[in-house]
Image (tube, rainbow, N blue to C red):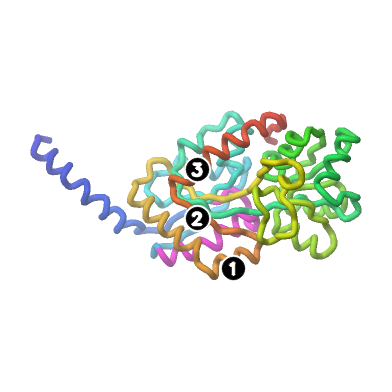
Amino acid sequence: MNKRELLTGLALLPLAAPALAQEYPSRPIRLLVGFAAGGSTDVFARAIAPRLQALLGQPVVIENRPGAGGNIATEATARSAPDGYTLLLGTIGPLAINPTLYGNLSFDPLKDLTPVSLVGEVPNVLAVPVDRPFRSVADIIAAAKARPETLNFGSSGIGSAGHLAAEQLNLMAGIRTTHVPYRGGGALLPELIAGRVDYAFTTALNGIPQAEAGKLRILGVPNGKRVPLLPEIPTIAESGLPGFDGVDWAAMMAPPGLPAPILAKLNAAMQSVLKEPELVAAMAARRLVLEASTPEALAEFLRRETARWAPVVRASGARPD
């Protein structure tokens, strides 16, 4: 290539970016979900996919790839071509907790993925069986201090948001309790109702209907502020542990090196979808909260979340199955 050809090519680069955005997408898009169908992440995906499809003009096909706490789908995304045709609906586990929990991942979520947009929060609640005497978070802490290592808590699995929220409670309250992991929230819920564990952080989607049916008692929420779904329930921070925050969340990610025009188009589509009044209402009915973000804000959020959960994971001594 001579100098004139090189200069001509460079001059055309600014024109290439708009053309790339206009051409994308020209074929179906895969949306990977690292968990089985039916969970909160899958609910988000199946609500978002048809609306993205309508905006982008191409099918958005959901692929559930469960396993390794969401790592299988996340790694597949990190290894995919940066062309916008493979996306990931990731969660707090594989994107912020697993880098410390596993320790030997073949990918780094902060380096090997492109943030697109935050999708929303999955509100959790601290719930106890109705036959337990606990009426507040302080009651659990007092009982645990009076009888160290006799109380147990359930979770939907090692390294899950519910597990780490309970470990954060142990750490901040200076108590010792026993972890009983289950294989998913569906397996945890009947065990909690039956009283086989003393308490658990479970999703609002599971916890609120059971509390309304008189089968569970909700004592607090791990969010930094009260949840609109449960305005009368105090936060854990309000219950004597200032600074406690254990929000579960989901985010849209893409492979590394995604071209800026495609990223901008995807973010604009997500911003539009996540603000649709009908979708916001439908997700609220499922006890889920939608929240969009810029790619830059999501990148900073991921850095904060990874740094915040690392010491909790280490202090818990948790190891993956």
Tell me where residue 244 sits by quadrant.
top right
Query: Residue 255, percent across and down?
Result: 43, 43
Query: Residue 14, percent across and down?
Result: 22, 48
For residue 240, above or below residue 26: above
How crowded pointer 3 is (Cα within 10 Å; few <14, some 14-19, many 20+) is rated as some
Name the one closer to the observer, 271 or 178: 271
The amino acid beneath tag 1 is: Ala
Q: Which mark is residue 198?
A: none
Quarter holding the C terminus is top right
Q: Nearer the viewer, mark 2 or mark 3?
A: 2
N-terminal label among 2 and 1: 1
Find numbered disc 3 in the image and state the secondary structure of the residue it sits on. helix
Q: CA distance from mark 2 to mark 1?
A: 15 Å
Q: Residue 289 vs residue 75: left or right?
A: right
Specify start and end residues of the magenta stretch as a single range: 31-55
How crowded pointer 1 is (Cα within 10 Å; few <14, some 14-19, many 20+) is rated as some
Q: Which mark is residue 292?
A: 2
Query: Residue 77, percent across and down?
Result: 48, 44
**Residue 156 visible in image:** no
Q: Which mark is residue 281?
A: 1
Q: Where does label 3 land, which residue? A: 76
Name the one closer to the observer, 164 or 94: 164
The amino acid beneath tag 3 is: Ala
Q: Nearer the viewer, mark 3 or mark 1?
A: 1
User: Which residue is at a point 42% across and 41% down the rendered structure image?
Assistant: 256
Query: Residue 245, percent across and down?
Result: 66, 44
User: Which residue is at a point 60% across and 53% down the rendered structure image?
Assistant: 121
The amino acid beneath tag 2 is: Ala
Quarter holding the N terminus is top left
Most extreme residue toward the bottom is: 278
